[in-house]
Amino acid sequence: MGFLTLLDHLINFAAPALWLALLLPWLARWLIRKRPSTYSLPAQIGFTFFAGLVILLLGLALFGQDGKMVTYLALVVTAATSQWLMRKG
């Protein structure tokens, strides 16, 4: 496997966590205006992205392959829970 192919695989592996980390804090700020967040937007994006990558790596290690729907469900639940906690639950 060449370097560009490996880079393509890594980007595509991390893409769900990245998009969820970018969109969820913006949507939370727009939809939930009653509770201000205690964390800045970059901190929320970074924490959600890191938690998402951990979940994706655990799903890969547990199931032996990428792309299981259970892993994506765990990714969404983890991201939503982290946003809920960062917005003072």
Image: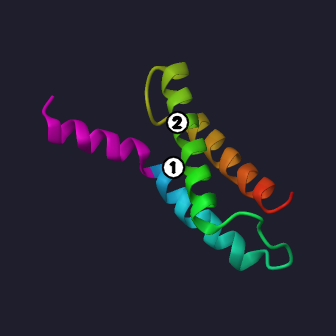
Which kind of residue does numbered mark 2 sit on? Leu
Horizontal side of residue 52 vs 65, given as left or right: right
Residue 72: percent from left, percent from top: 57, 42
Name the residue tied to disc 1: 17
Q: Is 73 in front, or is 4?
A: 4
Q: In the rendered image of this protein, does residue 36 appear above or below residue 75? A: below
User: Quarter holding the N terminus?
Assistant: top left
Give the residues in magenta: 1-15
Residue located at (46% from left, 37% from top)? 67
**Residue 11 x/y as whole percent:** 33, 46
Q: Residue at x 54, y 50 (%)?
A: 49
Residues tagged 1 and 2 counted as in contact (Cβ below 8 A): yes
Q: Residue at x 80, y 53 (%)?
A: 85
Q: Using a 10 Å C-alpha cutoff, classify the residue at mark 1 as few (fewer than 14 neighbours), some (14 to 19) or many (20 or more).
A: many
Residue extending furthest toward the left: 2
Looking at the image, residue 44 sits to the left or right of residue 35; the answer is left
Query: Does residue 66 belong to the magenta stretch?
Result: no
Would you name the residue on which mark 2 appears?
Answer: 56
Q: Position of residue 35 (x, y in %)?
A: 85, 72
Query: What residue appears at the point 43 percent right and 26 percent down from the top-left corner?
Result: 65
Q: Secondary structure at mark 2?
A: helix
